[in-house]
Image (spheres, rainbow, N blue to C red):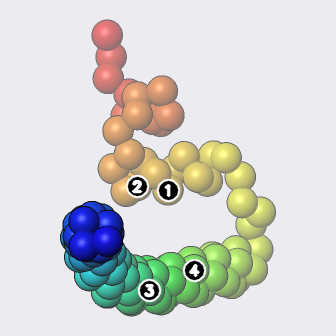
Amino acid sequence: MAQKIDDDNKLLQLKNQELKIQFASQEDDRDLLLRQLIYYKKENQKMRESHAKLKKQAEKLQEAERAEQAAKMLDGQKSDKPATAGGLIGSRLARGFKNPDLQHPTQAKSA
């Protein structure tokens, strides 16, 4: 009888040790998951802020582009000239566009 109780006690002690190890492992896993959760929440917040900043920049650029297009339309209405490819090439030359295929014949380099 004492031997049976002693054997049961040893088995229960082994089982207890296994469960303690398993419990410690689960605590470590939980701590790791919490640290990862906190990290990803912070990273998510940074990305949200970056996204908002980039979105504002994109809106400003679109607004500036719309204003530029509106100004070009007004300039086109004032001059009463339709926009042509020649006008585009001439404006690029006036700004110093250096593509020799698009330069005016008087400005092209002679070979």
Quarter placement of the N terminus: bottom left
User: Could you tell me how far apart the alpha carbons at marks 3 and 1 are, in whole angstroms?
Assistant: 42 Å
User: Could you tell me how far apart the alpha carbons at marks 2 and 1 are, in whole angstroms?
Assistant: 5 Å
Mark 2 vs mark 4, foreground winner is 4
Crowding at dot 1, Cα within 10 Å, few <14 / some 14-19 / many 20+, comes out as few
User: Could you tell me how far apart the alpha carbons at marks 2 and 3 are, in whole angstroms?
Assistant: 44 Å
What element does badge 4 sit on?
Answer: helix
What element does badge 3 sit on?
Answer: helix
Residue at 33 percent of width and 16 percent of height: 110
Q: Going by the picture, which residue comes out furthest to the front?
A: 1
The numbered dot on residue 94 is 2
User: Could you tell me how far apart the alpha carbons at marks 2 and 4 are, in whole angstroms?
Assistant: 26 Å
Residue at 54 percent of width and 46 percent of height: 89
User: Could you tell me how far apart the alpha carbons at marks 4 and 3 are, in whole angstroms?
Assistant: 21 Å
Residue 104 or residue 71, whichever sits in front:
71
Mark 1 vs mark 4, foreground winner is 4
Mark 2 vs mark 3, foreground winner is 3
* 100 to 6, vertically: above or below: above
Crowding at dot 3, Cα within 10 Å, few <14 / some 14-19 / many 20+, comes out as few
Q: Which residue is mark 1?
A: 91
Q: Which residue is mark 3?
A: 48
Whichever of callouts 2 and 4 sits on the residue coming sooner in the sequence is 4
Residue 4 makes an appearance in the image? yes
Whichever of callouts 3 and 1 sits on the residue coming sooner in the sequence is 3
